[in-house]
Amino acid sequence: MIPKAENIESWHPAGGQLEVALLQIMQRHHHESLRQRKQTAHTERAKMDAVRSAARVADLLVATVDGGVQELYINEKRIELEARALLATIAWYRKQTDQWLAATNAINSVLKEIGDFENWMKIMDFDCKSINAAIRNIHQS
């Protein structure tokens, strides 16, 4: 503890002015050191608070970005599943269309055969009528 300058006479009987000035300088220095320590402690607390706040902001930013990335990943997987389901549906419709096309071609072939048979029947009818007419002509002559 530093003695106060007012009590210098009780501390030192000679009580010179140099000692008083020196004591005042020491007291100011002591008070200034205490003030600076308090200010340094306050500054350190503020610095630590700022670091904690910056870390919290960084964590929130990372969480936000990670949340967006996670949502994108989930959406990508959902789209992939829907695309696979769509491809399976397209394959089913393609198979169904191929079956309908084969059935239509079969019907066309049958219709063509019926048309060919009908045409053959007309030709046979004409030939039979021609033969019948020729036999009548021969029979009548």
Image (tube, rainbow, N blue to C red):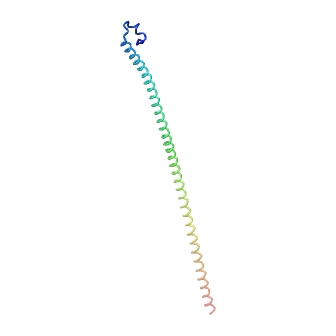
Q: In which quarter of the image is residue 26?
A: top left
44 is higher (above) or lower (below) than 27: below
Q: Which residue lies furthest to the bottom in this view?
A: 141
Is residue 89 left or right of 27 when viewed as pictured?
right
61 is higher (above) or lower (below) than 77: above
Is residue 25 left or right of 76 when viewed as pictured?
left
Q: Nearer the viewer, residue 93 or 3?
A: 3
Q: Where is residue 18 in the image (x, y as percent from the top left)?
A: 36, 13
Residue drawn at x 55%, y 57% is 93
The N terminus lies in quadrant: top left
Q: Which of 101 and 51 is in front in this view?
A: 51
106 is higher (above) or lower (below) than 27: below
Q: Quadrant of residue 40?
A: top left
Residue drawn at x 59%, y 76% is 118
Is residue 87 left or right of 9 when viewed as pictured?
right
Residue drawn at x 63%, y 88% is 136
Q: Position of residue 94 (x, y in %)?
A: 53, 59
Residue drawn at x 48%, y 35% is 57
